[in-house]
Image (cartoon, rainbow, N blue to C red):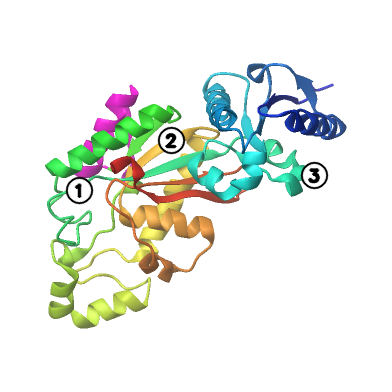
Amino acid sequence: MPDRRTVALVTLGCARNEVDSEELAGRLEADGWQLVEDAEDADVAVVNTCGFVEAAKKDSVDALLEANDLKGHGRTQAVVAVGCMAERYGKELAEALPEADGVLGFDDYTDISAPADMGPPATFVLLRHGETPLTPQKRFSGSGGSDPSLSDAGREQAERTAAALARRGTVQAVVASPLARTRETAGIVAARLGLEVSVEEGLRETDFGAWEGLTFAEVRERHPDDLNAWLSSPDAEPTGGGESFADTATRVAATRDKLTAAYAGRTVLLVTHVTPIKTLIRLALGAPPEALFRMELSAASLSAVAYYADGNASVRLFNETSHLR
């Protein structure tokens, strides 16, 4: 007979949360779960958060991060946030803490087993590289151009990002595009985290053909028909045999599938470019190709997507830049 699934309830805050935890424990036992005392002995850690007492709010976040740390080396497979903080700040909490595999408000308690049953997702933290000399000039800079390195500003952005990710302490691997600006950004972050950098060809930027190094206005002046076609259809290629967005999406989707299989249940930092990140977000949302033109992605920004075993994805964060301020 297989072992019963185990769950630990971590309760923060007031006496009301103790009562709620008793109710949750009853639901979980009815669903076939075995309750254990310590999160490190559990398949799933459920953190019953507090959203009112300031000290308990901080303790709630700390408890979620501590439980997430167990996923890298212990029995724990998933972390679920419930309680007052999850109810009051559900969306914000999910965005700020992609480490939580589920954030459930009071109305969702009947589904308490669902996030755990799916197991921990593969979470991709998506980092756009820091600035290059071409970034402030808004020039096309793909995989077919001059392959610029980071500027001084870009290196400073990478250092700030590294410090922010080190404080969180949840990244378990670093994978980068082969281009110089992403490898340099990844190297700065990985050194701070004590990790090695793996290079993945599928994360490179789109090849913009003859448009490499030009501004949008210059392309509009020199190649107006090609630009209009490119803006109208994901199948259109940039002038000179560049890569269409449709081809980029096919490559990125294949890379996503490869990496989700390789890093199942882990949190991985992917250091890549504007088009691959926007494409991963678009595909996760099921948005049409034209959505690429409706997203703004800043240099050294962070986004996050969680990929579950049932094939679904959840966008946890997009274009976060607070760590740069």
Amino acid type shown at disc 1: Glu
- Numbered disc in front, either 1 or 2: 1
Q: Position of residue 2 (x, y in %)?
A: 80, 23
The verdict on residue 198 being magenta is yes
Task: Name the residue: 27% across, 50% down.
Answer: 299
Quadrant for the C terminus in the image: top left
Report which residue position mark 2 lands on. 268
Residue extending farthest front:
53
Label 3, secondary structure: give it: helix
Quadrant for the N terminus in the image: top right
Span of residues in magenta: 178-201
> Residue 150, can we see it?
no
Disc on the earlier residue, 2 or 3: 3
Report which residue position mark 1 lands on. 131
Report which residue position mark 3 lands on. 110
Mark 3–mark 1 CB contact (< 8 Å): no
The residues tagged by marks 2 and 3 sit, at their Cα atoms, a distance apart of 31 Å
Task: Name the residue: 21% across, 43% down.
Answer: 181
Q: Main secondary structure of the magenta part?
A: helix
The verdict on residue 286 being magenta is no
> Residue 216, can we see it?
yes
Q: Position of residue 283 (x, y in %)?
A: 49, 58
The residues tagged by marks 1 and 2 sit, at their Cα atoms, a distance apart of 22 Å
Is 195 located above or below residue 129 in the figure? above
